[in-house]
Image (spheres, rainbow, N blue to C red):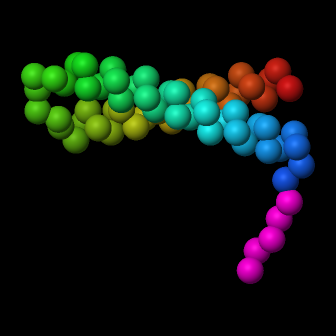
Amino acid sequence: MLLFSVNKSGMKRLKNWSRETTQATTLVINDFLRSTQYEMISLHKLSWMFYQINLRKYFNLNSTSALS
């Protein structure tokens, strides 16, 4: 069994990361659904959607870590 502790600062950063990830995911999925309302969803579009999610997560993480 693996046990670990997280200090208050680490917990706050984890919650912020989770919130930013959720917001980025929601934005990308909303854009994606809007653009594909009348189209078939293709594998290419799905892979592009997840690429954008990861890109936004990367920049969100970098911007928050640069400020702290």
Which residue is rendered at x = 18% and y = 37% of the image?
42
Quarter of the rendering containing residue 49 = top left
Residue 13 in sight in this render: yes
Q: Mostly what secondary structure, the magenta segment?
A: loop
In this picture, residue 25 sits left or right of residue 61 = left
Quarter of the rendering containing residue 4 = bottom right
Q: Is residue 4 above or below residue 13?
A: below
The percent coordinates of residue 37 (x first, y second) are 16, 23
State the residue in front, 26 or 65: 26
| Image quadrant in which the N terminus is located | bottom right
Q: Number of marks in the image?
A: 0
Which residue is rendered at x = 70% and y = 39% of the image?
15
Residue 58 in sight in this render: no
User: Magenta segment range?
Assistant: 1-5
In this picture, residue 57 sits left or right of residue 27 = right
Question: Is residue 58 located in the magenta-colored stretch of the structure?
Answer: no
Q: Is residue 8 above or below residue 68?
A: below
| Image quadrant in which the C terminus is located | top right
State the residue in front, 59 or 36: 36
The percent coordinates of residue 32 (x first, y second) are 29, 25
Which residue is rendered at x = 23% and y = 19% of the image?
35
The percent coordinates of residue 67 (x first, y second) are 82, 21
